[in-house]
Image (cartoon, rainbow, N blue to C red):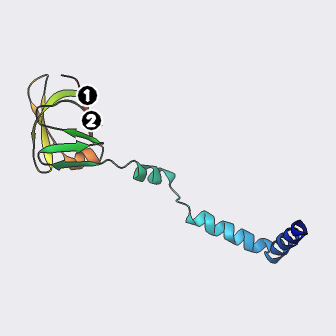
C-alpha cells in the first residue's frame, strides 16, 4: 500500500510541473554558474604571504634571516640566495652568484611574480 501511495504522489508532482517551468528553472541554474571557471580556480589557489616578528610566512612555511632559499620569477630563471633582511612589507635576498641583493615585496609574492622555496645549506 505504501509503494502505491508513493507512486501516486510522484505522478502528481510530475503532472503539476510543466515543461516550460522545467526549462525556466534550468536557465536560471545555468545563469547562476560562474561563466569563467578559471577565475574560480584562481580564487581557490590564493597565495598566503605575510611578515610577522621579523619572519616571512609564505605558502605554509616560515622563512627567517640567514636562511638559504631559491627565488623563482615569472620572467627570470631560478635564483639561489640567502634572506639578508626582512622589513615590514618586503625582504631582501642576497644572490649567491654575484652578491647583489634582490628586493621582493609581499605584493609580488601574492601576485605570483616571485615564489620562494627552501634549499639546503
Q: Label 1 neighbourhood size at 10 Å, few (<14), some (14-19), many (20+)?
A: some
On the image, the x and y values in percent for residue 94 come to: 11, 31
Instruction: Give percent across and percent down for residue 10.
Output: 83, 70
Q: Which residue is mark 1?
A: 78
Q: Position of residue 86 (x, y in %)?
A: 11, 43
From the viewer's side, name the closer residue of 69 and 105: 69
Left/right placement of residue 31 relative to residue 114 reads right
Q: Secondary structure at mark 1?
A: loop
The residue closer to the viewer here, 76 or 104, is: 104
Q: Position of residue 46 (x, y in %)?
A: 36, 50
Determine whether, in the image, residue 27 is placed left or right of residue 69.
Answer: right
**Which residue in the rendered view is the most extreme toward the bottom?**
16
Q: Which quadrant would the C terminus be assigned to in this image?
A: top left
Mark 2 → mark 1, Cα distance in angstroms: 7 Å
Q: Residue at x 16, y 49 (%)?
A: 52
Res 23 quadrant in image = bottom right
* Viewer-side residue, 20 vs 75: 20
| Residue at image point 56% right, 61% down | 33
Q: Which residue is mark 2?
A: 73
Could you tell me which residue is drawn at 88 percent across and 66 percent down?
3
Q: Secondary structure at mark 2?
A: strand
**94 to 26, vertically: above or below:** above
Amino acid at each position: 500500500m505504501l509503494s502505491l501511495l508513493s507512486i501516486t504522489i510522484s505522478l502528481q508532482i510530475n503532472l503539476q510541473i510543466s515543461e516550460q517551468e522545467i526549462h525556466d528553472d534550468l536557465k536560471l541554474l545555468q545563469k547562476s554558474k560562474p561563466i569563467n571557471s578559471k577565475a574560480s580556480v584562481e580564487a581557490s589557489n590564493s597565495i598566503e604571504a605575510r611578515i610577522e616578528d621579523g619572519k616571512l610566512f609564505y605558502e605554509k612555511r616560515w622563512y627567517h634571516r640567514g636562511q638559504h632559499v631559491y627565488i623563482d620569477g615569472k620572467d627570470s630563471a631560478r635564483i639561489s640566495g640567502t634572506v639578508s633582511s626582512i622589513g615590514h612589507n618586503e625582504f631582501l635576498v642576497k644572490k649567491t652568484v654575484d652578491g647583489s641583493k634582490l628586493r621582493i615585496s609581499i605584493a609580488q609574492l601574492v601576485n605570483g611574480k616571485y615564489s620562494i622555496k627552501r634549499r639546503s645549506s
